[in-house]
């Protein structure tokens, strides 16, 4: 989970500098890493985006919390923003909050 924290800290610095594209990718990385960390703790290796979605959905069902997949969808949009640079600063900042919320839900596992 240390890599998760590193990416989140780097995203905060990049957001403060106004580098929305790089911040978006670090936020995606933080989200993906927490999902992978929880999966690894359970003996599951995630290799693809489909694996990430599948595991996230299992956690959603386990917690009976549809916010889990909604928040992960926001993280996925941030990943897309890395390639397209289409999101506004406000949207990336909102996305950062969503990723933090997602991380909180996974840390409790």
Image (cartoon, rainbow, N blue to C red):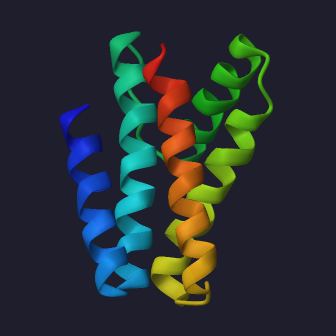
Check the image and report above or below for 67 versus 11.
above
Q: Residue at x 52, y 49 (%)?
A: 99
- Whether residue 60 sits left or right of residue 98 in the image: it is right
Q: Nearer the viewer, residue 78 or 104?
A: 104
Who is closer to the viewer here, 47 or 16? 16
Which residue corresponds to the image point at 53% horizontal and 69% vertical from the top-left? 93
Q: Is residue 98 found left or right of 1 in the rendered image?
A: right
Tell me how many marks there are. Answer: 0
Image location (x, y in percent) of residue 27: 42, 59
Q: In which quadrant will I find the N terminus?
A: top left
Q: Is residue 74 above or below residue 72?
A: below
- Could you tell me which residue is drawn at 62 percent across and 40 percent down? 53
Residue 54 point in image, percent of width and height: 64, 32
Quarter occupied by residue 39: top left
Residue at 61%, 89% (x, y): give it: 86
Residue 61 position by quadrant: top right
């Amino acid at each position: 989970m240390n890599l998760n924290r590193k990416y989140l800290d780097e995203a905060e610095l990049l957001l403060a500098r106004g580098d929305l594209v790089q911040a978006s990718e670090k936020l995606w990385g933080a989200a993906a890493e927490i999902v992978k960390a929880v999966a690894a703790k359970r003996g599951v290796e995630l290799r693809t985006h489909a694996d990430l979605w599948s595991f996230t959905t299992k956690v959603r069902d386990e917690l009976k919390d549809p916010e889990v997949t909604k928040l992960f969808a926001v993280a996925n949009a941030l990943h897309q923003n890395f390639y397209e640079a289409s999101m506004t600063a406000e949207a990336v900042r909102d996305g950062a909050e969503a990723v933090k919320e997602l991380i909180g839900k996974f840390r409790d596992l």
